[in-house]
Amino acid sequence: MSEATMGRLNLALKERRGAIMVIGVFFACMMIGWMWMLVGLGDAMIWRDRSQEAADAVSYSSAAVQAQGMNLISFVNILMLILTAVYMMMAFVYDVLDMFHVILGSTGDGGCEESSCKARQADAYLISLVPYFEWVEPIANQWCKAADIIGKLHDGNTNGAPSKVSAGGLFGLYERDVMIPVLPVLSKFEDIISYGAPWAGEFVGLYETTQYKDFGESRLGLPVSGTLVPATLTPGKPGTKLPVAKYKSCDETEWEEKGVCKPKNCDAQDPNNCQTFDGGDKREGLPVGIPDTGFTAVCTFATTKVTSLVSGMVKNILPGPVGGALSFVVSTILGALGNKIVNSYCKMDSKGLFSSVDSVVTGLRVATWLEQGGKNNKELCPNSASSLSGGWGGDAKDGCGGGPKRCEEVYDMKLLSGSQKGNAFWGDPQFAGGPHLVVSYAANGNDWMQVWGVVYGGNHKKIEKAEKLVGVAGMDSNGSGTWNTIIPQDSETSWDLYFSQAEFYYDCKKEGGNGAKWGDEPCNKESNASYHMNWRARLRRMHGLSWGKDLLGYVWNGSLGDTFDDKVQEGINKIIGNTISTAFNNPIAGSLAQTATNNMFLKVKDGAGEAVGGIFNPASSLPDFIH
Amino acid sequence: MMTTTKRWRKRAGNRGVAMVEAGILAPVFAMMMMMTMYLGGTYETKYRTVMMSRYATWSYAANGCTADNFKPIDDDLPPGIKLGGNSGGAGPQLTQPVDPQGGTGGNAEAGKFTGGAVGAGGASAGSSMGSAKGTSTMTWIYTPGISSQFQGAQQAITTQSQTLCGPVPDNGMDPFSFIKSFPFP
């Protein structure tokens, strides 16, 4: 090395000029890097935050649609309730008139010797001759006038089909033109809602996700709920295909001890507190189904509601133990009366409240049995089979000596048109339909009212870059190779999911049920929730899903007919049993070996099932890619 | 004639070079600092609009998208939220217009939004087609603090959120109330 070169080198080592510039450029580069990172961090934060909000919107929107679907079903149930309540009132009025019509005897229907009312009037005169029964005579004097009035009200005294302006005519018209055609259509409408609402929620959720755009990029989201898969495709007919355990959601002890309403997803948290539900599953998408009793269930709710309202009023008017006792008495009496009314007017083969009047009247007339009446009686009941194709009402006439009879078949309605013609109206959920009530295993808070939202927020060029910049800041060095160490290429954006959970629920507080249990009156006692439009939606914290465990249990525990277990144990018996038997030349040793191995197999299987099932445990930590 | 070594020695003797270099670099660093602050402020503003639009949207949606039920919680109100009644009526546009003064007048939290910057903005919510739509706009005006007269770049940042209106029936068994609120509350 020459002297000059050495001199330059020494000078360069002692040189101070440009030193600040070098440091400055270095820090400038650092600052540029920090700004770069700041941009990445900001973009990633906003993207992630908005993705989570989009996930919330997905699940909430679907839950809101389903809540509105439940409200719509409740609304239609209320329409059914109103129509049925009117029917019950008309039926009761007609039934009372029909009873008096039989007791007093019809007029205007001719007679063998006299009209029916004349015959009964003669009976009354005879009774008035008995000592202490003189008071009957003034009644007997007015007998036929009263019979005439009752006859006009009852059927218009037409001696045929009831007049349209009579109670019988109106009642028949109401049955034929309102109850029979309208209620089944309403039930069909409810079918459409219960099958359609979850899927409508699906599309709304999808749409709402597309509204969350940031940095010119959109997201893809999907709501998922158990209601998307109906348990039956034939409304009213229980489905048995789905391998979903059906539970009654409750923990009565906890609720009673703590006194607070804490809806519990018992199938996920503590299966021991749950009761399995047998008998098939009638759920149609939304957690509602048509009860076995069909439209009779509407009558039952109507009478129960009236009983509850009246007994509640009594309790409010008379507070304290007296009011409580009186309320109990009223409740018991009205409850019994309600049952009687439902049985009399709202079931197949219902015959009205006064079904024994015919025989009583006949029995009372023994004394004057010679007095004939009703020979020319041609009365027809409302919707009589004689006057209406497919009618059901029968006729009200009787031969000489009998007088008019009650229209007992008038309450037993039948479908009059379409392919369902001739089928019963009451108690026929498959053909006539019925109200849609919340299924017994669904309750506030359990999986049947949950909606999970999933948003895929990754794989966008700009966002992926931003995530990588954050990765640099976080010294994320996944992968291999120099470049991957500096900028990770396997960023989690390649599989970036955002989850959320929402639920639709019945707001018990709306009916004064703060702290009420699901089975209490403000919530769902006597299917209360299915007749109130108090369904709402809300977001909730993510929790695990019990269905995974249920499905695993279904397959693993041999619900498929023990095929798997049978095959394995058959193999064990062949291999182990024969081998041991041959080796020891002892069939007992072979049998013992078979038993021991079979038991071991079952133990291992149970252990494996528990281990896999634990993955679905709500308490398990979620994978990293789930936010 | 000066040798190369002598020239190097002469140059090495120059004093104040570092000062000059620092003087050259200082504005660059200052500019970078200002850019960093500007970026930070931009993201802070964006994040505030995200929070405010979310707040407006979800509180409105949870209350059935009706003016009567729109009762936002104001004890933890994020800065910039403007409280006000809904102008009523559903339409394709937001029914409660953005208040240009929102977040400044009377809002104690507005003070937090300074630090070399002046922000103004607000949030509002309305509904159309059954969806609650919230929007928040804030204007980010960068004031470096060199002089109150000097204002740097500014930009308006807007964020929109949307979700479906939640059902809030008035009366459990009143069909007329339900009809009134359906299908789009």
Image (cartoon, rainbow, N blue to C red):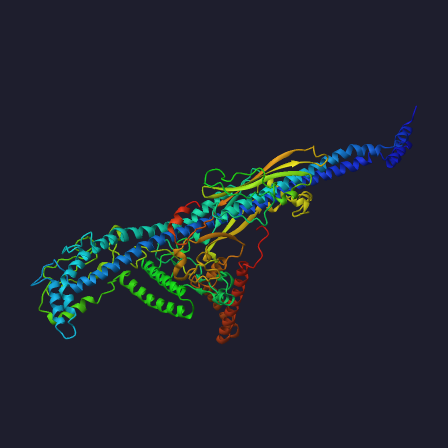
Of residues A421 and A486, the one nearer the viewer is A421
Q: Position of residue A75 (x, y in %)?
A: 38, 52
Q: Please tell me in which quadrant of the rendered image residue A352 appears.
A: bottom left
Of residues B55 and A243, the one nearer the viewer is B55
> Can residue A339 be spotted in the picture?
yes
> Can residue A399 be spotted in the picture?
no
Disc tally is: 0
Of residues A10 and A95, the one nearer the viewer is A95
Q: Tell whether B137 sits left or right of A158.
A: right
* Residue lying furthest right: B1
Q: Position of residue B136 (x, y in %)?
A: 56, 40
Q: Position of residue A621 (x, y in %)?
A: 58, 57
Q: Tell whether A471 sits left or right of B162.
A: right
B74 lies above or below A322: above
* Residue lying furthest left: A113
Q: Tell whether B148 sits left or right of A198.
A: right
Q: Position of residue A542 (x, y in %)?
A: 54, 54
Q: Please tell me in which quadrant of the rendered image residue A120 appears.
A: bottom left
Classify the position of the N terminus of chain A by image quarter: top right
A487 lies above or below A21: below
Identify the residue at horizontal 16%, vertical 69% (top origin): A136
